[in-house]
Image (tube, grey):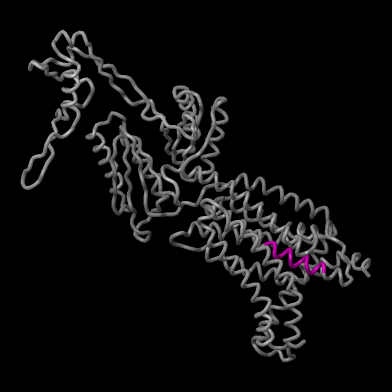
């Protein structure tokens, strides 16, 4: 056949599959593009770019490609001595040999349909277990070259004590050769510090490897609790990675009792390198009680007592003075050495209106009790937030699941759990992914049903989807290369749904044509699978080779690219292997007999 007739014939045969595959890929990415939250913010541009590229590619495939084939491709000649002809013949022989082996294997497998059906059911069921056993996190932790510490000292720690703690933290950071410089921010009761690491090529340890080492060293500092962690891989959250909220309508005293039990169980779990809560009843509060009768007997008034204490402790400025060309505030206040603790108040002297002075201990007593540092509410409930850092190798999802299991065990009726920070993002994005996946699946099914004018054919085509999902989840569940179920792998799984459906479309569409031309259903599906083997393998090879740079990527963002590349490569490769045998089997089981319909029509 000459190039032009051959191009026209090929274009007519492939118009249906090209349109169907374009609809599927567009249907997959549109829900991703319209998804809200972090996934939508990260991947909306990517989704609509792919939709536009696929649409343009389909137009090119239906118009420009046939024209180029008719003009650029040469007709086959009997002279096959050129190097191009010899290379083509070599490839053709290998592909034809592969087709013969595949056709024989497929014929044998179709003789045992129940076995193939059971195999497909096992693969489908395995998705539940593989998904459940996969490690989950919001996004893989990238080496951003920064390690941050959050230090919590005693509520009554003095400024000098906090400065000593800050210096010890600084010394722990700066002694590491990987550290470039250190930053610190001190505040009452809590301080934040961190180190910016040297460039990757100037250090041996990654931030993930250095984090537990620094945490262990920080634990040696007496008098302060220090949590070492890396900045979140994605924007939109602050604080420690794990933030688990326990809420109730009960009083804070009851909540604190339950919280102590919860913290004990959480620390026993062995999942956390650091764990703390914001509900702490350890703030010392001193109350000065004035004996009014003694005060009056000594010729003092309550105003005298109040104004004297305010002058000594208030710290308000009364004026400015100039020295060396600079202006300074005049702040009357007791020396710091005389106001280190509440008991020193009793040594202060109160001046009466007549000029006499009386020690405060004569007319006052001091009582001290502990109160909560802060009382927080979350979603209009009395709440306590448990913040923590998981051990290296423990993902955020595993840590949250551990706390959820403890909550079921420990929390009495009337208590609820919620999430904040990165934990809230993870839970929200995970539930949003399931909705997006199901919505895309429904759109694909309806689009294919309209294209094939049948509800059976879309079911047959979509059988390939769980095959590829299972293939990808195997590697995620095994944690190959540190792969986890995260926002990137979830987008990869949605992408797989569109890519693998192309194989089923090629096989089912051609099998329907063969039936209408007089073949039986089995002959049609065996013939269609054999003929479509080559384009299926070409598509699979192109996709796998296309994502190999993602798998072997280095530098910034390499971990995220590895995750999405691994999912697509393994899912499309293993899914193709399963699809080549499962789709024909399902076609025989539930596929429509078009040859009978054609006969009835005639």
Q: Is residue 316 magenta?
A: no
Q: Nearer the viewer, residue 408 or 323?
A: 323
Q: Residue at x 78, y 67 (%)?
A: 509
Instruction: Give the vertical position of 431 relative to 513 (above or below).
Output: above
Q: Position of residue 362 (x, y in %)?
A: 17, 12
**Residue at 51 percent of width and 46 percent of height:** 425
The percent coordinates of residue 283 (x first, y second) are 33, 26
Q: Which residues are magenta?
A: 500-512
Residue that appears at 64% across and 63% down: 26
Q: Position of residue 213 (x, y in %)?
A: 38, 45
Q: Determine the residue positioned at 35% across, 41% down.
A: 150
Q: Is residue 509 above or below residue 490?
A: below
* Quarter of the figure that contains the N terminus: bottom right
Identity of the residue furthest to the left in this view: 324
Q: Which quadrant of the view contains residue 14?
A: bottom right
Number of dots carrying numbers: 0
Q: Nearer the viewer, residue 372 or 101?
A: 372
- In the picture provided, is 10 more to the left or to the right than 486? right
């Amino acid at each position: 056949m000459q190039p032009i007739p051959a191009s026209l014939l090929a274009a007519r045969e492939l118009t249906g599959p090209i349109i169907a595959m374009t609809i599927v890929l567009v249907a997959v990415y549109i829900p991703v593009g319209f998804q809200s939250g972090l996934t939508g913010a990260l991947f909306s541009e990517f989704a609509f770019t792919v939709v536009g590229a696929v649409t343009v590619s389909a137009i090119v495939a239906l118009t420009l490609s046939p024209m180029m084939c008719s003009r650029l491709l040469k007709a086959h000649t009997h002279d096959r001595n050129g190097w191009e002809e010899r290379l083509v013949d070599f490839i053709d022989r290998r592909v034809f040999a592969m087709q013969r082996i595949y056709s024989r294997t497929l014929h044998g497998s179709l003789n045992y349909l129940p076995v193939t059906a059971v195999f497909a059911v096992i693969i489908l069921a395995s998705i539940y277990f593989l998904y459940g056993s996969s490690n989950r996190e919001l996004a893989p932790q990238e080496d951003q070259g920064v390690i941050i510490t959050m230090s919590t000292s005693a509520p009554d720690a003095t400024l000098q004590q906090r400065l000593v703690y800050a210096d010890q933290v600084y010394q722990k950071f700066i002694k590491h050769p990987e550290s470039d410089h250190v930053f610190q921010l001190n505040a009452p009761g809590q301080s934040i510090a961190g180190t910016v690491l040297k460039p990757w090529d100037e250090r041996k340890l990654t931030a993930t490897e250095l984090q537990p080492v620094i945490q262990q060293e920080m634990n040696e500092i007496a008098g302060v609790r220090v949590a070492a962690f890396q900045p979140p891989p994605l924007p939109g959250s602050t604080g420690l990675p794990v933030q688990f909220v326990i809420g109730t309508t009960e009083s804070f005293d009851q909540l604190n009792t339950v919280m102590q039990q919860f913290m004990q169980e959480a620390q026993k779990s062995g999942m956390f390198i650091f764990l703390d809560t914001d509900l702490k009843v350890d703030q010392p509060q001193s109350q000065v009680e004035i004996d009014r009768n003694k005060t009056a007997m000594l010729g003092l008034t309550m105003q005298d007592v109040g104004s004297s204490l305010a002058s000594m402790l208030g710290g308000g400025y009364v004026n400015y003075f100039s020295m060396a060309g600079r202006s300074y505030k005049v702040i009357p206040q007791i020396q710091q050495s005389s106001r280190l603790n509440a008991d020193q108040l009793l040594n202060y002297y109160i001046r009466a209106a007549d000029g006499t002075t009386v020690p405060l201990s004569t007319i006052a007593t001091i009582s001290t009790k502990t109160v909560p540092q802060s009382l927080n509410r979350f979603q209009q409930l009395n709440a306590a937030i448990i913040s923590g850092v998981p051990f290296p190798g423990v993902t955020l999802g595993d840590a949250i699941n551990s706390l959820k299991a403890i909550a079921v065990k420990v929390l009495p009726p009337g208590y609820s759990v919620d999430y904040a920070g990165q934990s809230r993002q993870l839970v929200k994005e995970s539930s949003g992914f399931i909705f997006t996946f199901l919505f895309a699946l429904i759109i694909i099914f309806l689009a294919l049903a309209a294209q094939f004018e049948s509800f059976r054919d879309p079911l047959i085509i979509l059988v390939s989807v769980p095959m590829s999902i299972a293939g990808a989840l195997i590697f995620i569940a095994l944690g190959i290369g540190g792969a986890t179920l995260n926002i990137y792998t979830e987008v990869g799984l949605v992408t797989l749904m569109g890519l693998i459906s192309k194989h089923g479309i090629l096989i089912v569409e051609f099998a329907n044509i063969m039936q209408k031309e007089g073949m039986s259903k089995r002959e049609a599906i065996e013939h269609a699978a054999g003929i479509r083997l080559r384009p299926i393998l070409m598509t699979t090879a192109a996709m796998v080779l296309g994502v190999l740079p993602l798998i072997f990527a280095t530098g910034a963002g390499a971990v995220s690219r590895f995750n999405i590349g691994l999912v697509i490569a393994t899912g499309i490769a293993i899914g193709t292997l399963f699809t080549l045998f499962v789709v024909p089997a399902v076609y025989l089981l539930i596929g429509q007999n078009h040859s009978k319909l054609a006969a009835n029509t005639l």
